[in-house]
Amino acid sequence: MIGLSFLLVLLRSKAIQKDTDTTAYWRIIGYDEVFFLYLLNLKIWHNKSRVRITGNDMVKQNIYLVGPMGAGKTTIGKMLARELSIPFYDSDQEIEKRTGADIPWIFDVEGEEGFRLRERQIIADLCSQKSVVVATGGGAIGCPENRQQLRKSGMVIYLYAPVITQLERTIKDRKRPLLQSKNREQILTDLFQDRDPVYQDIADIVVDSQKLSPRGIIAEIMGAIDKECT
C-alpha cells in the first residue's frame, strides 16, 4: 500500500520523465522534493492507520464500570462496547443467565450472602477474559477479592451519581432487593456513604454521570483509553 502511494505521489508531482536514450530506466527530476512528498504521504498513511485502530488492537485490557444503582453502568457499558467493537457483559445479568433465576429470587432464597458468593464467582470469570467491557453490580466492590481482580486486570471507571440522581433513576424500579423499603432515599444515602470512598479508591478515572450526557461520558472515557494506549 505504501509502495502504491509512493508511485502515485511521483506521478502526481510530475517529477519523473522517461529517458528517451535508455528505455530500461527512469530518470527522477527533483529527487529531494519527491522524497519529501513520499515521507509526508507515509506519515499521513500512518496517522490514518492509527485512527482506524479499534477493538482488541486498541484495548489491551478490560474496562470495568463501577458505581451506585442508577449511575447508568449498563447503558454506558453497552455504548462503550459498541464504540470499541468489543463484547459487553453485565455481572448481574450474567448471574441471572447462569442460575436461571432473577436476583430478587436469589436474595429471597439464599440471602445477600448467597448472592455475593455467586457475584464473586462471576466477577472472577469475567476478569479472566480479554478486551471486554463489564458493568458491575453496585455492591461488587464491597468484596476485597473483587477489588483485587478488577484492579489487576483492567481499567476501572467510576460513574459517579449523587443520591438525588440515584433516587430519580430508580424510583420506578421494583427489582432491586436492597431498595424494597419505604425509605429508599435513606437506604441510598447509607449505601453511598459506605461505598463512595471505595469507588473513589479503586477507580482509575471518575466520570460524573449527572453532569454529562451519555455521549459526553463516552467521549471522556475514550479520551482516557487513548491516553492509556499512547
Image (cartoon, helix red, strand yellow):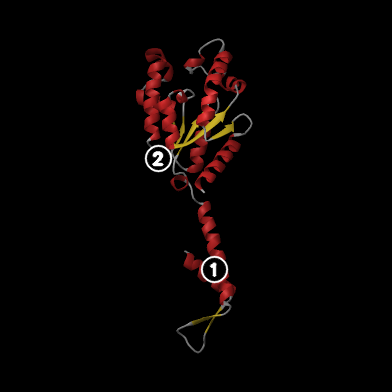
Q: Quadrant location of residue 192?
A: top right
Could you say where residue 183 lies in the image, as x and y percent from the top left?
A: 57, 11
Q: Residue furthest right?
A: 211
Q: Please name whichever residue, 189 or 56, is drawn nearer the observer in this view of the structure.
A: 189
Q: Residues within 10 Å of mark 1 (few under 14, many from 20)?
A: many
Tell me residue 186's x, y (percent): 57, 13
Q: Is residue 68 visible?
A: no
Question: Disc 2 marks which amino acid?
Answer: Lys
Q: Position of residue 225 (x, y in %)?
A: 52, 42
The three-letter code of the residue at mark 1 reads: Tyr
Give neighbour class at mark 2: few <14, some 14-19, many 20+ (Cα, 10 Å): some
Disc on res. 168: none
**Rendered view: 134 above or below 171:** below
Up/down of 206 relative to 101, above or below: below
Kindly identify the residue that appears in the image at 49 percent across and 40 percent down. 82
Q: Which tag, 1 or 2, sits closer to the chain's start? A: 1
The secondary structure type at the circle numbered 1 is helix
Residue pushed farthest bottom? Answer: 21
On residue 130, the disc is 2
Q: In this view of the protein, which residue sits in the foreground, 113 or 73?
A: 113
Tell me the distance, in whole angstroms, between the alpha carbons under discs 1 and 2: 38 Å
Q: Residue furthest top?
A: 182
Q: Is residue 176 above or below residue 214?
A: above
Disc 1 target residue: 38
- The residue under the point 50% across, 30% down is 202
Please name whichever residue, 191 or 34, is drawn nearer the observer in this view of the structure. 191
Query: How far from the left and from the top, in percent, is residue 206?
Result: 56, 33
> Secondary structure beneath disc 2?
loop
Name the residue at 56% across, 76% down: 31
